[in-house]
Image (cartoon, rainbow, N blue to C red):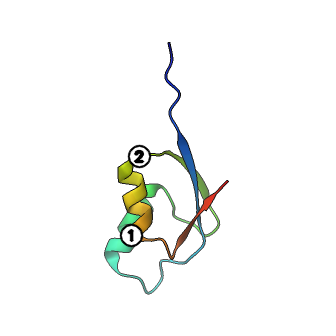
Amino acid sequence: MADKKKTIRIKQIGSPIRRPESQRKILVGLGLDKMHKVVERQDTPEVRGAIAKVQHLVAIVD
């Protein structure tokens, strides 16, 4: 029986310009490289932690 994984949609709302390199790398790790891009990732503690580090640059889309 296939187990359905919960997913979360993340949208980049802030620019990485003039941000620390670590925050830029987190955005790239999430798959975000352009403004207003939306990606879908599995809802895991690791992804939630990455979102928390750049919460001023991303938004969770319903």
Please name the residue that numbered disc 2 is placed on: 44
Q: Tell me which amino acid carries mark 2.
A: Thr
Residue 25's place in the image compared with 15, above or below, is above
> Which residue is at a point 38% across and 64% down the rendered structure image?
26
Q: Position of residue 10 (x, y in %)?
A: 57, 57
Q: Is residue 46 left or right of residue 18?
A: left
Under tag 2, what secondary structure? loop
Q: Position of residue 41 (x, y in %)?
A: 50, 46
CA–CA distance between discs 2 and 1? 15 Å
Please name the residue that numbered disc 1 is placed on: 53
Give neighbour class at mark 1: few <14, some 14-19, many 20+ (Cα, 10 Å): some
Q: Is residue 62 left or right of residue 23?
A: right
Q: Tell me which amino acid carries mark 1.
A: Lys
> Which residue is at a point 37% across and 50% down the rendered structure image?
45
> Which residue is at a point 54% across and 78% down the rendered structure image?
15
Circles 2, 1 touching at the beta carbon (< 8 Å): no
Q: Position of residue 44 (x, y in %)?
A: 41, 46
Question: 34 and 62: which one is in front?
Answer: 62
